[in-house]
Amino acid sequence: YAVLHAPNLPPETFQWSTYAVRKDPSGMGYLTHAAVAYRLGRYADAQTALKEAQKEIPPTDQALSTLQQLVASALRQK
């Protein structure tokens, strides 16, 4: 939630989240990485991270489903 609604994210945030999921590849880590990628306009990267997050997070999770909808919408508009 905080990542999706933060006013601005520095570009380095993507590098940090990439490093974080490499060190600890968890579902929540990938979900955060997807949110960062989405906020920075890196929709393909966000979609890839969401696929990894789905392996551990149930599809009924509100954060996961909201982010999936946002990324899908952004990719359709592209």
Image: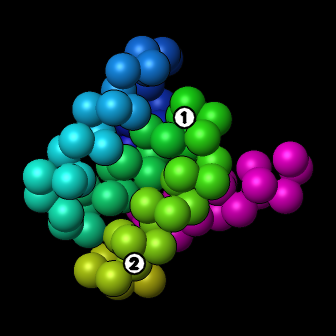
Q: Amino acid at mark 2?
A: Gln
Mark 2: few/some/many CA within 10 Å (<14, 14-19, 20+): some
Q: Is residue 46 left or right of residue 31?
A: right
The main secondary structure of the magenta stretch is helix
Q: Secondary structure at mark 1?
A: helix
Q: Residue at x 23, y 53 (%)?
A: 21
Q: Position of residue 19 (x, y in %)?
A: 22, 41
Label 2 sits on residue = 54
Q: Secondary structure at mark 2?
A: loop
Q: Which mark is residue 39?
A: 1
Q: Residue at x 33, y 32 (%)?
A: 15
Mark 1: few/some/many CA within 10 Å (<14, 14-19, 20+): many
Q: Position of residue 27 (x, y in %)?
A: 26, 68
Q: Position of residue 76 (x, y in %)?
A: 84, 58
Against 62, residue 3 (above or below) is above
Q: Residue at x 50, y 41 (%)?
A: 37
